[in-house]
Image: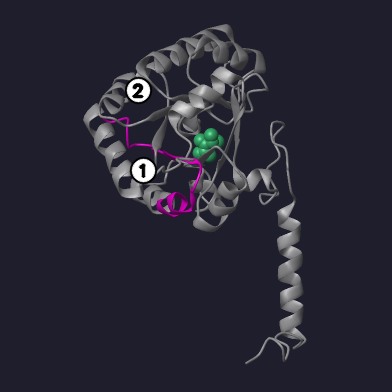
Amino acid sequence: MSVHVQNSRMTTAKLRQMKANGEKIAMLTSYDFTLASLVDEAGIDMLLVGDSASNVVCGNQYTLPITVDEMIFLTKGVVRAAQHSLVVCDMPFGSYQVSEEEAVRNAIKILKESGCDAVKLEGGEEILPAIRHMIQAGVPVMGHLGLTPQSVNQFGGYGLRAKEDAEAEKLLHDAQLLDEAGCFSIVLEKIPAALAAKVTKAVSCPVIGIGAGNGCDGQVLVLHDMLGLNQGFKPKFLRHFASLAGEIKNAVGDYINAVKDSSFPSAEESY
Ligand code: KIV
């Protein structure tokens, strides 16, 4: 008797097929088991354990301080939650820029210890040798171009990137290099929609946009932003699909009142 095991997990090959079919790809960040389980059950295609965890989880101003071990710790919980989606872990600042050898060593460490499916790293031609070595070593790599938050100190802020022709041309060239090197996907962050659409047509791998318009193969948002948990942050590209900050504060307020007026716990809630 033959046993047929159905593999319903997302793969890089399926993502390519989705691009070929014109089927949009939905990606969200996740940083813990409980929320990742809900997002996975809802049917997301890819979960990104972004180094935005540095801001969202740790409360840092920038993504720069988070470490490889901290990313691995968070990614393990997300991997345990992911029944269907493909899990990508961001390589943090400093883990792939020093040398190709160190980049490959860190990428392998992240894959082995966290159990994720792929890594993402920021940059184009400058980090191409590291990307080539990782792919040769069998590590699936997602690129990230445009606004790359690990370079915030070079950019001098989080403004729109590639507005001028020279930067737009470099971005298109970088995307083609990443595609030729074998990146399974590329994130484009905060660039003009027309440029993102041009890049999406010019490369064979799926392109995922954030603040890059509707011409990409898919979209990614930071989960806490789109759920309306992060009240102070509302850039033009962000849509709030829920307003959970208010709901959480109301629930916590109700709990505090119930404790203070002794209505919680009731007899039914007691042993
Ligand atoms: O770290 C992150 O959350 C990201 C996304 C914004 C793409 O890189």
- Residue 106, x across and y down, in percent: 28, 39
Tag on residue 2?
1
Image quarter of residue 247: bottom right
Spatial CA distance of label 1 from label 2 is 46 Å
Tag on residue 51?
none
Direction from residue 154 to residue 196 in the image, left or right: right
Q: First in sequence: mark 1 or mark 2?
A: 1
Residue placed most toward the observer, 129 or 5: 5
Q: Residue at x 48, y 36 (%)?
A: 10
Q: Secondary structure at mark 1?
A: loop
Q: Is residue 249 above or below residue 87?
A: below
Q: Residues within 10 Å of mark 2 (few under 14, many from 20)?
A: some
Direction from residue 116 to residue 201 in the image, left or right: right
Res 223 seen here: yes
| First to last magenta residue range | 76-99
- Is there a contact, CB below 8 Å, between mark 1 and mark 2? no
- Residue 105, x across and y down, in percent: 24, 37
Closer to the eye: label 1 or 2: 1
Q: Residue at x 44, y 12 (%)?
A: 176
Number of disc labels:
2
Q: Residue at x 51, y 44 (%)?
A: 84
Residue placed most toward the observer, 103 or 148: 103
Tag on residue 127?
2
- Residue 8, x across and y down, in percent: 49, 40
Q: Residues within 10 Å of mark 1 (few under 14, many from 20)?
A: few
Specify how the rendered protein is coloured.
one colour
Quadrant in the picture for the N terminus: top left
